[in-house]
Amino acid sequence: MISRSIAKRYAKGLFNVGEKNGKYKEYQLEINGVLGVFDKEDRLKKAIMLPLVEVKKRRELLSDVLKSLNVSAPLASMFTMLLEKNRMGYLADIREVYDELVDEKEGRVKGILWTAFPVDDAARGRIESELGAKLGKEVTLTALEDKDLIGGVKVMIKGTIIDGSVRKQLQTLQENILKE
């Protein structure tokens, strides 16, 4: 929870800069590029992120990486600030929040679709279209199989769960019968 709020602060700051200068999409690509290098080069990632190496050497190493990737000045400043404050471990959360901000700006929203059985792309597409029409946004769902579901579907978008499962419908029916 704390890591998410810290990540929000950095992501929003960078996004605001990108929104003002029209480069928010470029910053998103740059963040993904830097983190992609860190994911591929585990030793490099550890050398930069772990506070065992003195800050000056880590700053030089980070600077070299950012220069080799032609990272923009605002993003380089953010990375340097994160390094100096020992907050490089928040990078994955910052990327996630930044991606959400870009999606919000561009009228997109991502969610999770749980089904009892595997769902084909056409069915998922119909659910995305229906939700998109109701939300007024482009919806992209990641489908997951949940063996605990009897039937129906559950969807979570931005923390809101829409439960259309058979289990929930039976629960609602039972509650209504008990009320009478």
Image: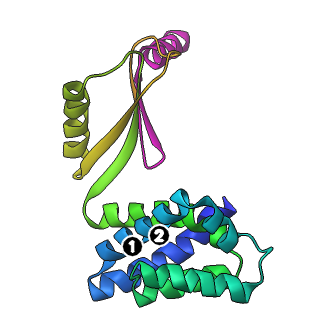
Badge 1 element: helix
Q: Residue at x 56, y 67 (%)?
A: 91
As rendered, which of 170 and 131 lies closer to the eye?
A: 131
Q: Where is mark 1, residue-wise?
A: 30
Q: Does the stretch in magenta take in 172?
A: yes
Spatial separation of the CA atoms under disc 2 and disc 1? 6 Å
Give the percent coordinates (x, y) of residue 22.
26, 83
> At label 1, which amino acid type do we have?
Glu
Looking at the rendering, the stretch of residues picked out in magenta corresponds to 155-180
Residue 4 in view in this figure: yes
Residue 78 in view in this figure: no
Total labels: the figure holds 2
> Is 148 situated left or right of 25 in this image?
right
How crowded is the residue under tag 1: few (<14 C-alpha within 10 Å), some, or many (20+)?
A: some
> At label 2, which amino acid type do we have?
Val
Q: Quadrant of residue 79?
A: bottom right
Circle number at residue 45: none
Q: Residue at x 70, y 85 (%)?
A: 57
Badge 2 element: helix
Q: Where is mark 2, residue-wise?
A: 34
Give the percent coordinates (x, y) of residue 132.
23, 45
